[in-house]
Image (tube, rainbow, N blue to C red):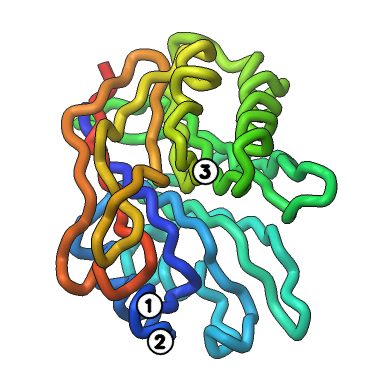
Amino acid sequence: MRFRVLSYNIHKGIGGLDRRYDLARIIETIRHYQPDVALLQEVDDGAKRSNHHCQVDLLAAAVELPHQAYQRNVRLRKAGHYGNAILSRWPLLDAVDVDLTIPLKKRRCAQVCRIDAALHGKLRTIGLANVHLGLAGFERQIQLRRLLRGELFSTQAAEMPFVIGGDFNDVWENLGKKVMEPAGFELASGQVKTFPAAAPMRRLDRIFCRGPIESISAFAGHTGLARRASDHLPLIVDLEVK
């Protein structure tokens, strides 16, 4: 039972090199990799810089992942917001926002939900979480621990597959050993580097999994368009539910 998860900081649809807004590049990049679930960060809603687009609606329709959840994290001064979004081939159930904001730091939240995925004729429940963690090392550890020790995770059955992905901003690459592994999660995305898109040097974007699920393959989208569409490359992981 295999399915594909894509994690992508789309940078509001603004290119990392040319600084030009062009959501079509993001759309084509996502469509190229045909994910079953897309975990997106820095998604605009009503912002002037992105033509006041509701990007989650445009993306869901264009990439044919009709089920969506959007989370407004940061309110912009003039108009609009940006935040996280989940797009899925299957309905998103019990979607909730978990506040991860640290005092005096930018507002951060996680999206948590589950899907009942029809995989090869069988229905399997899979938990999902989408995160965009803070820029400071201490901030990221506090945020992850708050998420993993919260009621949503402590009440989840160990036999249910669970996937956490997003922009971890983990410059020093220590969150896995310090926080995720003690909570039972394994790194599914391996050594894949996604930032900066033009010449990736860091593994800022990650996907972890827990329970009866394992990574089959992991790679970054290296098409010419992907290198221009955002300042991050998309991270793609193929997972198998046991």
Q: Label 3 neighbourhood size at 10 Å, few (<14), some (14-19), many (20+)? A: many
**Percent coordinates x, y for residue 192 in the rendering:** 25, 41
Q: Which residue is drawn at 40% across and 29% down?
A: 208
Asked if the residue under mark 1 is in contact with the one under mark 2, i.e. CB atoms within 8 Å, the reply is: yes
Q: Nearer the viewer, residue 122 or 54?
A: 54
Q: Is mark 3 on a helix, strand or loop?
A: strand
Q: Label 1 neighbourhood size at 10 Å, few (<14), some (14-19), many (20+)? A: many
Amino acid at circle 1? Gly
Q: Which residue is drawn at 46% across and 34% down?
A: 164
Q: Label 2 neighbourhood size at 10 Å, few (<14), some (14-19), many (20+)? A: some
Q: What element carries label 1?
A: loop
Quick one: label 3 or label 1, which is nearer the N terminus? 1
Find the distance from the CA under tag 3 to the CA under tag 1: 22 Å
Which residue carries the number 3 mark? 130
**Percent coordinates x, y for residue 13 in the rendering:** 43, 75
Residue 15: give its label.
Answer: 1
Q: Residue at x 34, y 14 (%)?
A: 212
Q: Quadrant of the C terminus?
A: top left
Q: Which residue is drawn at 51% across and 67% down?
A: 56
The quadrant holding residue 213 is top left
Q: Nearer the viewer, mark 3 or mark 2?
A: 2
Say whether residue 28 is left or right of residue 89: left
Amino acid at circle 2? Arg
Quick one: label 3 or label 2, which is nearer the N terminus? 2
Which residue carries the number 2 mark? 20
The quadrant holding residue 216 is top left
**Percent coordinates x, y for residue 227 in the rendering:** 25, 68
Q: Which of marks 3 and 1 is in front?
A: 1
